[in-house]
Image (cartoon, rainbow, N blue to C red):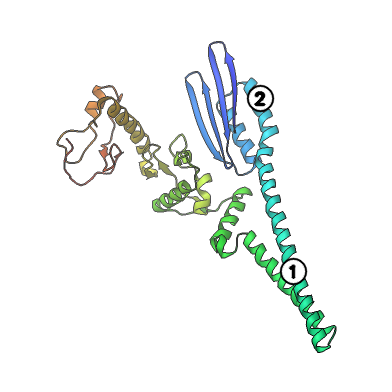
Amino acid sequence: MKYEFVKEHGKLLEKIMIDSEPKWIYIKYNKGNFEKVAYTIKNNSTLTQDFIENFIDDYHVSEEIKVDIRKYVKERTPVESNFQEFINFLLKTTSLHLMIGVALGLSIYGGYRLGTLLDLRYTFYPAFTLIGVFAGVTIGSLTGYVMMLKYLGTHAEQGGIPAVKKALKRKRIDADLEWPVIEATINDIREAVRKFSADLPKGINRTLLVKDDYSIDFEQLAPYLDGIPTRFFYMSKETYEIFEETDKEIPAIIDKVQKSVNLYFRVNNQYPVRPYDPLSRVNYYQLLQGKYLDKHPDIELYFTDFEGLITNQKPEKKKARG
């Protein structure tokens, strides 16, 4: 659900939009020409409230809008985060208890009827009746136990051991436990980011992991790494390439040039590259001449095999672009 809060300051319009999804909170803030966007996972209502509170404080939202937002957070966030979960839980548990009750009742009745028939035939009353009742209780209990396992997600059809691990991981996030410090390689980070991206809702990309200084937010990535790396890693918001501490200046350069390349293509319907360059380097002269860039970057960047996408990785010599 989307909520907008608007305040006019003379000719200056201030607006903040909060989009509350089942698992995510999205905030967009505009004040004049200033714009800021942020996302976060809905771990629990307390963390969500903290996220919103930090956002409005960090970007100096006016006091009038702050009052309205805090009222919204107080009145609506707990309802949205808990009511639907309660309804789903109620429906599931009611159905589960009903099925277990029916299974147990039928098992006991079946055992009783079978025991009674055997007693009438062999005149051992009430021996077979008691045995039948106890057998019915046992079978009914085992049936209920299997149903409980399936409901809790530990049955093979619900994902088996991986499902349990996933549930435990969610519990660790919700509990806001302190993650251990771990050693992680750049390949570990790439794999964790890939898994994180696969779990994102449609329409939201992995750039929400990237902080303003291009460092990766490991608080969000920790569940996929099972810890917080000892070293910083950085990521481009435009190409999603990941870099180590020694190359931390590269993502900002790549993003700036990539945006310039995209704009150049939209205007000229061609990419800024020298006609017979075997390395397909980005032609900074064309970007500077057209004022798509304000200064010459300190590193060489190259076009990849993906049309329009650039990288700092020097390729092998290949056929030049025309």
Location of the C terminus by quadrant is: top left
Q: Is residue 81 above or below residue 107?
A: above
Which image quadrant for residue 104?
A: bottom right
Residue 131 in view of the camera = no
In the rendered structure, the answer to whether residue 32 lies left or right of residue 86 reads left
- Where is residue 244, by image quadrant? top left
Identity of the residue drawn at 34% across and 34% down: 253
User: Whole-Å distance between the Cαs marked 1 and 2?
Assistant: 57 Å
> Is 101 located above or below residue 322 in the figure?
below
Figure label count: 2
Q: Position of residue 124 (x, y in %)?
A: 83, 87
Q: Quadrant of residue 262?
A: top left
At horizontal 59% and vertical 55% (from top left) the residue drawn is 167
Q: Amino acid at mark 1?
A: Leu
- Residue at horizontal 72%, vertical 63%? 100
196, 180: nearer the viewer:
196
Eye-nearest disc, 1 or 2: 1
| Label 1: which secondary element | helix
Residue that carries the numbered disc 1 in the rendered image? 106
Residue 285 in the figure: left or right of residue 145: left
**Mark 1 or 2 closer to N-term?**
2
Residue behind mark 2:
68
